[in-house]
Amino acid sequence: MQLNYPIPKFKGWLKSKIPHYFKTRNRNINTNEALIKNENTNTYIVEFRGTRIICRQDNKLEYKLLTDPDSYDESNFYAITSLVKEGATCFDIGANIGIYSLVLSHLVGTNGQIHAFEPVDHIRHKFLVNLAFNGAKNVLVRDFALGDRLNELPMYQVKEGLFRGGTSTFVHNNNVEVMGEDAFERRTVRIMKLDEYVAEQNLTRLDFIKIDVEGFELNVFQGAINTLAKFKPTILFEHDQNRLNGLKILESQFSEILSNLGYSCFEVFNDGRRNLLAPYCFDRKLKGNNLLAIYISIGE
């Protein structure tokens, strides 16, 4: 497979904003070679689900999207494209370089709105470049995090240039253990409750939430109770059981919150032939690391 997308005319503006990000352009990449040569620092454009994402081989997330875009989070995006409609309001919590935000932006159209939260500066800069590249004007990017209380907390922020660029976290999780604390910078980050943010923004609807915050998901839920009860958004969230076990976070803590609010959960996965949703009651080992929570109330 060959990828060959030219950088458009505003490349000079982008280069002036982030000079380290563009090395070469208008080059072909053979993905078989890319599997071997990660030292390549060329920049490429990948067309992905109605968007175009700037990618390099020296970042794990971008490398996966670059080498196999069709299978990148395939089950998650199957669910999203089935559930998110034009005009929707969506939250992307732990937005990284903006892949989910951009796809959501494309789905909701000009009448919809995306609120994205990414507190790591160098990652958020990539996100902003991707927004500009796509001309996405319905995405609001926030530089703080969401949690269970108004606060400031030290965050392990992965150092710029490391291959595993999506591992920043508020908790000392398995990624910090494996990569070592030297791979991270400790920076203080402002935190708001999702409930407080929704009230501050005077939002009148919230249709969909995606949460991927490396072990801080329960905290986000704990700060979102009123909003979930009021708007009943569909929620796609990472649920890494091995990571949660290491952090001593119990399955019952998620189950209690969601069931009390009228949500049912489904495992999102691909069995090698098709994308599937399987009912999940926090009672077994997951095949993957993602759950979909849908409000279902008997009698409505």
Image (spheres, rainbow, N blue to C red):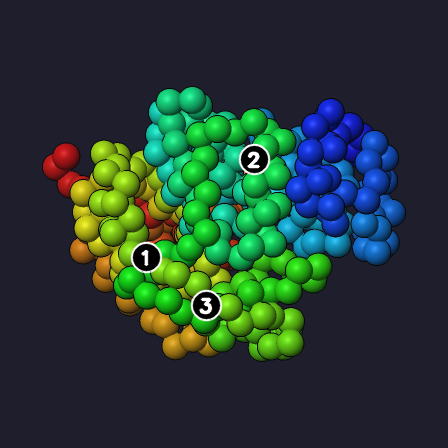
SS category of the residue bearing label 2: helix
Residue with the mark numbered 2: 131
Residue displayed at 38% across by 38% down: 90
**Disc 1 marks which amino acid?**
Met
Q: Which label belongs to residue 192?
A: 1
Picture coordinates of residue 221, whole percent (x, y): 30, 57
Q: Is residue 252 above or below residue 109?
A: below
Of badges 3 and 1, nearer the viewer stands 3
**Disc 2 marks which amino acid?**
Leu
Of badges 3 and 2, nearer the viewer stands 3
**Disc 3 marks which amino acid?**
Thr
* Classed neighbour count for the residue bearing mark 1: other residues with Cα under 10 Å, few (<14), some (14–19), many (≥20): some
Residue with the mark numbered 3: 188
Question: Left of 96 or right of it: where is 285?
Answer: left
Picture coordinates of residue 267, whole percent (x, y): 42, 50
Question: Left of 295 or right of it: where is 76?
Answer: right
Rendering quarter of residue 207: top left
